[in-house]
Image (spheres, rainbow, N blue to C red):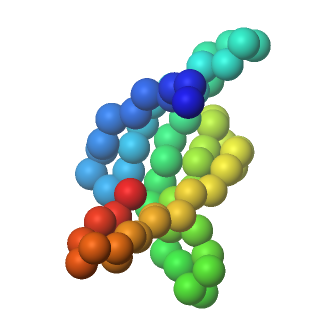
Amino acid sequence: MAIIGTFTRDGDNFVGTITTLTGVAPVQIQLVPKPSPNAPDYRLYRDRGEVGAAWLKSSKSAGLNNTY
């Protein structure tokens, strides 16, 4: 799988860049309050506009509880 972004943690948020064939975009990934259980955990912003969302993923197989 190709890596298109690099980010660093900034408190509960992340800052970094996404690189595609058409350019490099600075992006902020911000932790947001969840109004419902299915709502995203994070929102992705470029400049002032929202460009995506992200959810935490948990795995409880083999007795492990990992969050990705």
- What's the residue at 43%, 28% (across, down)? 6
Left or right: residue 45 versus residue 59 is right
Of the 4 image quadrants, the one containing the C terminus is: bottom left
Left or right: residue 60 versus residue 22 is left
Left or right: residue 7 versus residue 64 is right
Q: Is residue 32 above or below residue 44?
A: below
Residue 35 visible in image: no
Q: How many marks?
A: 0
Q: Quadrant of residue 2?
A: top right
- What's the residue at 38%, 51% (across, down)? 13
Residue 51 visible in image: yes
- What's the residue at 53%, 64% (across, down)? 55
Pick the front one: 10 or 37: 37
Query: Residue furthest toward the front?
Result: 62
- What's the residue at 67%, 50% (across, down)? 52
Q: Position of residue 30 (x, y in %)?
A: 47, 54
Q: Position of residue 57 (x, y in %)?
A: 46, 66
Q: Is residue 15 above or below residue 65?
A: above
Query: Residue furthest toward the bottom?
Result: 36
Left or right: residue 29 versus residue 24 is left
Of the 4 image quadrants, the one containing the N terminus is: top right
